[in-house]
């Protein structure tokens, strides 16, 4: 019973970490927080970022003016990033 509880807690912890990476994806990529993530988490973040960037570009950003396309710029302004609560 105790082993099942520990496995559940570990799985829950990993799900929360992935959800936080997804929620703050642009912040994680732009601020290069690779030292805080494992290699697998960083690979997940980069692949998710590229997939979203491609999806947005193909379906949305081609139909709006270039100055509103913040994902096509060299660096993304801080107003478009949500920073995690690190207190």
Image: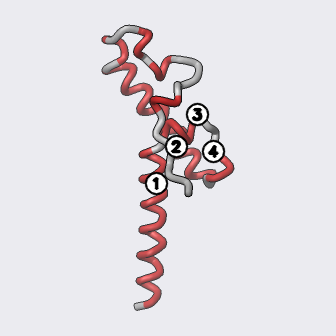
Residue occupying image coordinates x 43% and y 61%: 15
* Circle 1 SS class: helix
For marks 2 and 3 on the same chain, the one whose residue lies earlier in the sequence: 3
The image's colour scheme reads secondary structure
Q: Quadrant of residue 57?
A: top left
Quarter of the figure with the C terminus: bottom right
For marks 1 and 2 on the same chain, the one whose residue lies earlier in the sequence: 1
* Circle 3 SS class: helix
Residue occupying image coordinates x 36% and y 19%: 58
Could you say which disc has been placed on residue 18 in the image? 1
Q: How many numbered callouts?
A: 4
Residue occupying image coordinates x 35% and y 12%: 62
Task: Mark 3 and mark 1 in contact? Answer it, CB < 8 Å.
Answer: no
Q: Among all residues in the image, which is located at the extreme right?
A: 35
- Alpha carbon distance from label 1 to label 2: 9 Å
For marks 3 and 1 on the same chain, the one whose residue lies earlier in the sequence: 1
- Alpha carbon distance from label 4 to label 1: 14 Å
* Circle 4 SS class: loop
User: Residue 16 at x, y = what percent?
Assistant: 43, 60
Quarter of the figure with the N terminus: bottom left
- Alpha carbon distance from label 2 to label 4: 11 Å
Identify residue for label 4.
33
Identify residue for label 2.
45
Q: Label 1 crowding class (10 Å Cα cut-off): few <14, some 14-19, many 20+?
A: some
Could you say which disc has been placed on residue 30 in the image? 3
* Circle 2 SS class: helix
For marks 4 and 1 on the same chain, the one whose residue lies earlier in the sequence: 1
């Amino acid at each position: 019973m105790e082993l099942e509880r520990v496995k559940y807690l570990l799985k829950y912890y990993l799900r929360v970490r992935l959800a936080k990476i997804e929620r703050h994806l642009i912040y994680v990529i732009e601020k290069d927080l690779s030292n805080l993530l494992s290699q697998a988490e960083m690979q997940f973040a980069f692949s998710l970022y590229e997939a979203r960037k491609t999806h947005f570009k193909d379906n949305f950003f081609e139909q709006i003016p270039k100055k509103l396309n913040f994902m096509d710029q060299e660096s993304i302004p801080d107003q478009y990033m949500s920073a995690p609560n690190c207190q």
